[in-house]
Amino acid sequence: MTSFAFTQVDVFTDTPLQGNPLAVVHGADALSDAQMQAFARWTNLSETTFLLAPRSPEADYRVRIFTPGGELPFAGHPTLGSCHAWLERGGSPRVSGRVVQECGVGLVNIRLDGRRAAFAAPPLRIQAVDEATLAPVLAALGLSRDRVRRAAWLDNGPNWLSLLLADADTVLALEPDHAALKNLAKVGVVGPHARGADADVEVRAFAASIGVPEDPVTGSLNAGLAQWLIPDGTLPARYVAAQGTRMARSGRVQIERDGDTVWVGGHSVSCIRGELHL
């Protein structure tokens, strides 16, 4: 039996239990793929990460990201949570104020700003959604077509069938049929809040196909939505997204477009520190 340092982090919040939890296993190079998958399935969190020695000379560390149902090349809250845990355990970036993460999509830059971090959104592939694909998804969401303003496939590692809805109230009212969605797609929805709310948009993410019926706060989806909706002015260059409301969470994602780069940021807080024995 081998021992590994372990941290459980709450991401996209500075208040414990209000964001998206992430399990982080440090120094995990000795673990096999099967052990990583088994542990991720056991934690039953939306993602579990394993920190490894980097292969790229430019990277500070390498990370592998597992859901209960499989491995992901990239995900947002595991990126910020893993960075937080790595720094807390004594990680020292090669460049002050910047961490470089190596993962399945390559190198991801993370900038540090006090207690908050933000990752540079990876390249996004946008594709149209045909009506034949969209119709059963809307049926599974219990959503009428006239409440959908735009739809697209957004692929930045995870591939999200993404919907811009009429407003935040429509987003919050959804009662998805997760069993039906499991065989269709990972679905992300976003809708604007009324002026004066403490967030600009409300986001929800449904990913039953990878064992996560609803994800509390989703960095990859928020990154894709920003890259999709900022360029044409649908969303401003800087805004705050709320996510997790229907799950009694209060996740907040800070979005900022700087030139051609979209930065996706938030706070992280450690809730559990200890050892894992496998």
Image (tube, rainbow, N blue to C red):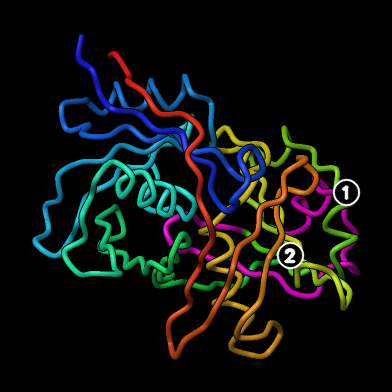
From the top left corner, tell me how far across and down residue 277 is, in percent.
29, 14
Who's the residue at 67% across and 70% down the image?
A: 240
Q: Quadrant of the C terminus?
A: top left
Q: Residue furthest top?
A: 1
Is residue 27 placed above or below 152 in the rendered structure? Answer: above
Q: In the picture provided, is 255 more to the left or to the right than 60?
A: right
SS of the residue under disc 1? loop
Give the distance between the C-alpha atoms of the residues marked 2 and 1, in whole angstroms. Answer: 15 Å
Q: Which residue is mark 2?
A: 190
Is residue 202 placed above or below 61 in the rendered structure? Answer: below
Q: Quadrant of the N terminus?
A: top left
Is residue 122 placed above or below 104 in the rendered structure? Answer: below
Residue 142 image label: 1
Who's the residue at 14% across and 44% down the image?
A: 53
* Residue 23 appearing in the image: yes
SS of the residue under disc 2? strand
User: Residue 82 lies in magenta, yes or no?
Assistant: no
Amino acid at pointer 1: Gly
Q: Which residues are magenta?
A: 134-160
Is residue 95 placed above or below 72 in the rendered structure? Answer: below
Who's the residue at 48% across and 62% down the image?
A: 116
Who's the residue at 27% across and 57% down the image?
A: 101
Q: In the picture provided, is 61 more to the left or to the right than 124?
A: left
From the top left corner, tell me how far across and down residue 106 is, in percent.
26, 61
User: Residue 135 lies in magenta, yes or no?
Assistant: yes
Frontmost residue, 111 versus 74: 111
